[in-house]
Image (cartoon, grey):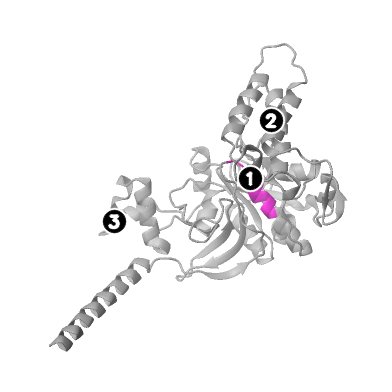
Amino acid sequence: MKKVLVLALLAVFTINASAAKKKTAAKNSNKPVFTVIKENPITSIKDQNRSGTCWAYSTLSFFEAEILKATGKTYDLCESFVANKDYMDRAIQVVRYHGDCQFSQGGAASDVHYVLKHYGICPEDAMPFPGSLYGDSLNNFNEFFSLMEPYVNAIAKNSAQKISTQWKPGLQGILDAYLGKCPEQFTYEGRTYTPQSFVKSLGIDLDDYVSITSYTHHPFYTAFPVEVQDNWRFELSYNVPMDEMMRIIDNAVEQGYTVAWGGDVSEEGFTRNGLAYMIDGKAAQSLAGSDMARWLKLSRTQKTNLIDSLGCKVPEVVPTQAQRQERFDNWELTDDHGMLIYGIAKDQYGKEYYMVKNSWGETGAYKGIWYMTKNFIAANTMDYMVNKKAIPADIRKKLGI
């Protein structure tokens, strides 16, 4: 009798375990399983923490990857150096405009490029570790910018007929107190450098880099400054049709290059778990018999959970040139974040994604890496920096570069 009872219990447990296994398998069946098509070498994942410096982290990651490709050497370049120089330059512009432009934490890939060309760069350990000067373990710009913004605005909107030059040393003191003083000279691997001589030693040509975008309010194959506030240096981007914008990215990755991407991550399809899809809301609503039929009534958190559950079966918009322009003009396509595109992968259904390095530490399901569909990138790219050698020859000819 006991033997029969034991066998019966074992049978129940086996059935329950099998059912649980099937339930788990069903639950996870939509989770992407990635196969890498092309993956280029990159440097380690960094964490910008509570600072609006994605532009510095992503673009220095880009240049680190460029150096790695050109020389085989790995560098950790200093974001604080770039921020120190860039924020002073931006403050000077705000004062020149009497406050009629924005002073903020944000920036663009062109800011990093400008700093490297005009001021040089130093390695990370030539300046204090981020946050260490004010007792934090990483960057925290809350107090820093609560001091800087009113300081700059007080000078820029001063009613005096003439301002003194002393505001610059005062601002430099704030920058140095929170970011560290930029070294005039330092030692790296037994050699003494200035920031300018160090950048010249890195094995890359800073004239090789261009910015690419795609909009119809300017002629294709011309260059214009993308009209966003953080493009305060008015850096020119080459304007190409959307399909060519995407072809340049593909060609760059295939040829071993990376891309310093800037775009919109405020979309509902950009999850905090390492995935990004260009959700088709209308198609989602029409999925009869599924929870997605209630799409518009759900909170952002509920939508995110459903996106995660649908995984790579999420219905996506196929972007068009007209949609890109409309979303840019009506403020849907915004300049939110900078990241580094370095590879291409596909899921179990053959859909292709870009492998993208973020600067939020080793977070999400892929420890700091995001898999962003090509539809998402096509729809949400503001602009990107790339080595002009990575641009297909026919497009380079049209651009005259």
Give the x, y percent position of residue 264: 53, 46
Q: Which mark is residue 291?
A: 3
The residues bearing labels 1 and 2 have C-alpha atoms spaced at a distance of 21 Å
Quadrant for residue 223, please give it.
top right
Does the magenta run of residues contain 130?
no
- Is 28 on the left-hand or right-hand side of 158? left
Depicted 285 relative to depicted 27: above or below: above
Q: Which mark is residue 55?
A: 1
Q: Which residues are magenta?
A: 51-62
Depicted 238 relative to depicted 203: above or below: above
For the point 73% across and 55% down, the residue is 388
Give the x, y percent position of residue 250: 62, 62
> Is disc 2 placed on a helix, strand or loop?
helix
Frontmost residue, 354 versus 88: 88
Q: Earlier in the sequence, mark 1 or mark 2?
A: 1
Give the x, y percent position of residue 212: 66, 49
Query: Which residue is under mark 2?
Result: 174
Does the magenta run of residues contain 53?
yes
Frontmost residue, 228 versus 64: 64
- Is 26 on the left-hand or right-hand side of 381? left
Q: Is residue 400 at all visible to an observer of this figure?
A: no
Q: Amino acid at mark 2?
A: Ile
Give the x, y percent position of residue 73: 76, 62
Instruction: State which mark lies toward you, 3 or 2.
Output: 2
- Is 85 on the left-hand or right-hand side of 149? right
> Is disc 3 placed on a helix, strand or loop?
helix
The residues bearing labels 3 and 2 have C-alpha atoms spaced at a distance of 52 Å
Instruction: State which mark lies toward you, 1 or 3.
Output: 1
- Is 66 on the left-hand or right-hand side of 190? left
Q: How many C-alpha atoms fall within 10 Å of the one at disc 1: few (<14), some, or many (≥20)? A: many
> Is most of the magenta stretch helix, strand or loop?
helix
